[in-house]
Amino acid sequence: MSPSTPELSIWDLDALSPENDGQSPSVPSPIPHVREIVDGTHVKRFKFTDTDLRRYFDSRDPYPTRNPATAVTSEKHEPDHRQKDILALLCRSSELAVEIGKYLSPGDIASLYRTSRAFHEAINQYMSASVRAWIAHKAPEAGRIFDFRLYKRHLVADPAGRTWGYQYDVTSDKRRAMSHQGSDDDPGHTVNAEKAEQVRAVPGLRYLQLVVGRDRYCREIRAILARNGHRTPSSMHPTLLKLWLCLDIPTSAQRAALLRNKDVWADADLYNAQLLFVKLGMHFNDPVYGPNTYELLHLMLGQRGLYPLW
């Protein structure tokens, strides 16, 4: 080899082209280039044909891969970020999705339900059981008093599509209905065949916000009275909830019937209610400036609920 002839290295990419013999360096190589990602780094490499590999490299790949786990990937490949979403992985189990909701406020649960598809689908499978579990964890006393059957406008159709026949027995005729009346089972736990095919109504997130919100408002009402020197016993909390339920009832006859029900209003509740009226009367009247009337108390108790009092 003449000293004036430059020595060509096997890794000289421009010298490897079969069309480059005798051509000036300014002529582009016919072997195409590709941009790839190797170990997280963008590199530019030749794309050899089988003929090129046999001619220059004895059919061996000049870019060997160390192991299949670090194989060269195309630049257009996009990593799958879904597997990195820990919330989506947890929500694959409905039980774990319910446990997550126990540590969130009703507003946060609603926001997560709107934005997370995994959480949305997990809760939709068992909407009724999920809402009941959250209420039992956050406000068990309020959930017992504010029965969801009293708030039909806050119910939603079962997202899972379960019908009334899934929950109750189906009566085929009047004879079967009469047999249920004579048995120990409650006849109200049966539905006719026509209603059994309808999608049942279950408590939804609006009902959850209603129950948990009222429980919080009643606790804060007691706290406001205590900060102003009007402390109440611990049993006052369920009495406030029952008073709110009584104010939800539209007619006086139904309210009187509720107050006569000793399963709902015990003697201790009647005493706590009277004590609450006295404390509110003292709170609304200044000992010096007055006005020495119960007009404001009557106004507050005439509202539909205790929310204005809060």
Image (cartoon, rainbow, N blue to C red):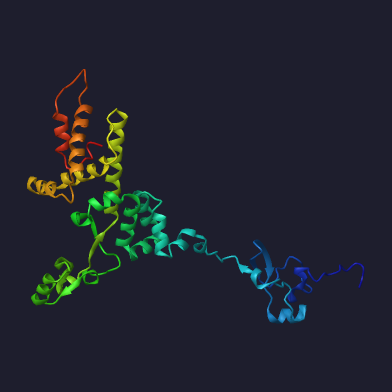
Q: Is residue 187 left or right of residue 51?
A: left
Which residue is painted at 38% across and 63% down in the image? 122
**Nearer the observer, 2 or 67:** 67
Which residue is painted at 11% across and 46% down in the image? 255
User: Taking 192 as reference, is 89 above or below it?
Assistant: above
User: Taking 168 as reference, is 237 above or below it?
Assistant: above
Q: In x, y percent, where is residue 299?
A: 15, 34
- Quarter location, residue 61: bottom right
Which residue is painted at 22% across and 43% down in the image? 239
The C terminus: image quadrant: top left
Q: In x, y percent, where is residue 16?
A: 76, 73
The N terminus: image quadrant: bottom right
**Nearer the observer, 163 or 228:** 228
Q: Is residue 289 left or right of residue 208?
A: left
Q: In x, y percent, where is residue 108?
A: 37, 50
Which residue is painted at 19% across and 31% down in the image? 278
- Quarter location, residue 117: bottom left
Q: Is residue 87 left or right of residue 141?
A: right
**Nearer the observer, 157 or 226:** 226
Q: How many marks?
A: 0
User: Taking 183 as reference, is 203 above or below it?
Assistant: above
Residue sticking out furthest to the front: 267
Q: In x, y percent, where is residue 25?
A: 76, 66
Residue sticking out furthest to the left: 253
